[in-house]
Amino acid sequence: MITMDPTEPLPEELASLLELFHAGKRTALARAISVIENERPGFQEFLHRVLDAGPRAQRIGVTGPPGGGKSSLIAALAHLYRAGNEEVGVVAVDPTSPFSGGALLGDRIRMNDLANDRGIFIRSMATRGSLGGLAATSKEVIDLMDAFGLTRLLIETVGVGQTELEITGAVDTVVVVLVPESGDGIQAMKAGLMEIADIFVVNKADRPGADHVLNDLQSALHLRAGGAWAIPVLKTVAQTGEGVPELLDAVDRHREHLEESGELEVRRRGRAAVRVREVTERALRGILWGGTGTAALLEAGLDEIQRRTATPYSVAASILGVLLNGD
Ligand SMILES: Nc1nc2c(ncn2[C@@H]2O[C@H](COP(=O)(O)OP(=O)(O)O)[C@@H](O)[C@H]2O)c(=O)[nH]1
Ligand SMILES: [Mg+2]
C-alpha cells in the first residue's frame, strides 16, 4: 500500500543521471531539477541518494516587498562571489510570473550577464498558490544545488503573505530588503519582518529618506534588543554595488555566529522537521487519491450527498475508514 520506499532501485535513466550528477556535469543538474519539478517516477529515490551528504552550502534568503531591489542585490552579491571563484546557485520564487521552468530572470536587470557564466546556476520557480508560498519542490531544488556542490545559494522570495515566514524555514540567513519610500520601516514592523530578519538592508540608498528608514529600524531593533546576534542594518545601492561588500561581510559574520552558537544545527533540524512533514503529507495525499478506490468512493459519496442521504462529513469519514481500517 505504501508506495514510497526511497531505497528502491532507481529507474535506469535516473541511475545514469545520478552518475553524471556526481561527476559534476552541469547539464545533469539541470535535468535533475526537471525531474524534481515534474515529480517524475523515482524523484524521491533520486533525492534520497543525492542528499545523503547533508547540507553544506551557505543558504541566504533575500526577501522584502516587490520592486525593492532583491533581484538586483542578488545579482550584485553573485558577482562578488563569482569574483572570488565561488559557485553560486540562485532560486527566484516569484508569484508574479507564472511557472516558467528553467527560464532565466532574463528580463531582469543584471542577471543577464550572469546567465552565460558557467559558475552560476539560476532557476526561477513557481510559487505554491497565489500568495507565494514556498513549495516543497523549491526547497528540493535548493537541496539539489547544494548537493551538486554550489557553495553559495541565494533564494529570492517576495515578502507577502506566508512566504516571508516560510523563508525562515528554508535558509540559514534571512536578509530583509526595504526601500526609503515612506513608512517602510513601520511597514516592516507591521508585516512581521522584524521577527524574521537576520540582516536588514535599506536598498536604493541613492534615494532620499534612506537614513530615516535606517533610524526607524535601528530604534525599533534597539527596543527589542537581546539575543546573541545584533541585527545589522545596512545601506546599499544595488545598481552601483555600493554597500554590497558590507552586506556580504554581514552574511558571513552571521554564518559564523550560527556555527559558533550552535544555532545552525538548530535551524537545520527545524528545516528537516518541516521537510519530513511535507514529504509524508505529499505521499499520503498520493496514497489517498492516487488509487481508484477512494476516487470511486468519492463519486458514490457525491451521489449520496445529492440525494441528501449523506453529508461531506459522513463521506469523508467513510473514505477515511476504508483507507485506515479497510472497512
Ligand atoms: N535607484 C535605485 N534603483 C534600484 C536600486 N536597486 C534596484 N533598483 C531598481 O529597482 C527596480 C526593481 O528592482 P528588482 O531588483 O527587480 O526588485 P525586486 O522586485 O525586489 O527583485 C529595477 O528597476 C531596478 O533597476 C537602487 O539601489 N537604486
Ligand atoms: Mg525580483
Image: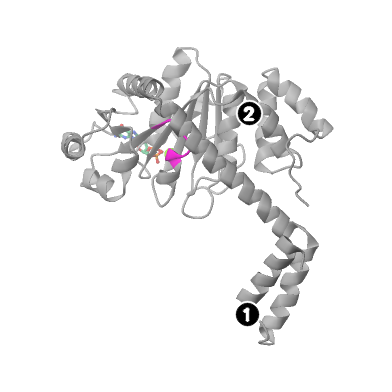
Q: Is residue 31 visible?
A: no
Q: Nearer the viewer, residue 132 or 323?
A: 323
- 211 or 149: nearer the viewer: 149
Count all numbered tags in the image, as a single digit: 2
Q: Is residue 131 magenta?
A: no
Q: What amino acid type should be assigned to the residue bearing mark 2?
A: Leu
In depth, the one of 238 and 266 nearer the eye is: 266
Q: Which mark is residue 311?
A: 1
Question: Residue 282: percent from the left, percent from the top?
Answer: 64, 50
Give the residue drawn at x 81%, y 33%.
9
Q: Quadrant of the C terminus?
A: bottom right
Pick out the residue farthest to the right.
Answer: 12
The residue shown at (66%, 18%) is 24
Does residue 156 appear left or right of residue 277 in this picture?
A: left
Q: Is residue 148 above or below residue 304?
A: above
Relative to 286, residue 51 above or below: above
> Which residue appears at 74% of the width and 73% of the height?
299
Q: Which residue is mark 2?
A: 51
Asked which secondary structure carries label 2, the reply is helix
Q: Give the magenta part as a residue range.
A: 167-173
Q: Is residue 209 above or below residue 190?
A: above
Residue 198: image location, x then y, percent:
33, 32
Q: Residue at x 61, y 30 (%)?
A: 144
* Amino acid type of the residue tagged 1 in the rendering: Thr
